Image (cartoon, rainbow, N blue to C red):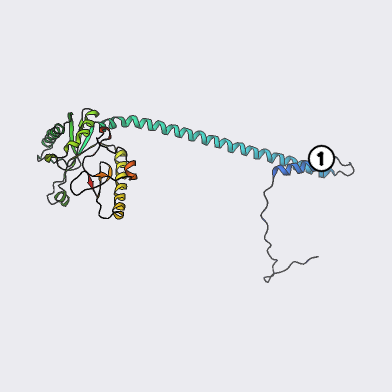
Amino acid sequence: MSKRKINSTGSSPIIPRKAPRMPSNELAISTATDLLLELQNCENTELNAKTQMALNLLLNDLNMLKELLDSKDETIAAKNDIITVQTLRIEEMQQKNDQIQQIIDAPKIAEHRRSIVIQNFQESKFKSADESIQDDTIKVQQLISDIGAYAKVVACYRMGSKNEKEDDQRNQKKNFNRLMKVQLQTSSQARDILSNAKNLKGKVTYEGISIRRSMTNEERSIQSNQFQDMKNRIDELKKQNAGVNYCIFRNKICTKYLDGRTPTAVVNEKLNANVSGANSTPLNPRQFPTTSPMSM
């Protein structure tokens, strides 16, 4: 008889047990079937009835286990089918929601398409809202006429609150004027104004004024991100080309000249090619340009 080794604590050493191997159901059934057939072929005197009965019970249990596993596989497959169907339904609902949202947004988009925004337009000197609106309307209609566009102002209003503090540092430094939104009769009138906005150049009365299209919140967000990317790119270009001035003009990164010449687009600039609605010469009215450079 072999003796167990006793450790210093007086107890038997702990022998780590191997992790059980996952059984192969198919192999077990095959082995049990082969063994049962072999026993059945033996002489009756050699055949142990209890062994044969035990093997039959084992084979039945294995078959039941196989049916259970197959049933679970079918259940998992059915659940996967349900998930697939639900995913398709969610996608269909999302498409319907998008279509409904487009219908809801259609009037707003139509309003934006027949509207323009004027930047740096002088604030009216009138105190009352009615007089200010009337004064702005008359002056905007005159601007439209002066640039050679054909359009009728339906409504115009300032965006944002009027800051009347005389000691406001921003107003003192930049002569801050609120943006003015102008609604026209048709989208074609808005495009006509934007096409002729280049005629503002050289007119002392409208110095510093620029015109752009009215944009949705999503369009403003996209433009804001593009503008920030361009600002970051200009910072890189300044480090690479010391002494060269850059600006954003007509939605492109341009070289700025100190002698007053029109800025020219930087050649082979990746961001210039990726900007939607970038302007060319002559200006395309459907691309809704801005008309003044924004220096960095």
Residue 133 drawn at (x, y percent): 14, 35
Query: Which residue is found at the position 38% from the left and 33% from the top?
Result: 98
- Viewer-proximal residue among 82 and 288: 288
Give coordinates of residue 238: x percent, y percent: 28, 53
* Residue 247 appears left or right of 71: left
The quarter holding residue 119 reads top left
**21 or 112: nearer the eye?**
112
Lateral position of residue 174 relative to residue 30, left or right: left
Question: Image quadrant of residue 197?
Answer: top left
Mark 1 Cα within 10 Å, few/some/many (few <14, many 20+)? few
Q: Position of residue 107 (x, y in %)?
A: 28, 30
Question: Which residue is found at the position 42% from the left and 34% from the top?
Answer: 94
- Amino acid type at circle 1 is Leu
At x 44%, y 31%, the residue is 92
Find the residue positioned furthest to the bottom: 8
Q: Secondary structure at mark 1?
A: helix
User: Where is residue 18, by image quadrant?
Assistant: bottom right
* Residue under the point 55% across and 34% down: 81
Could you tell me how many numbered marks the image carries? 1
Extreme residue in the left direction: 126
The residue to which callout 1 is attached is: 37
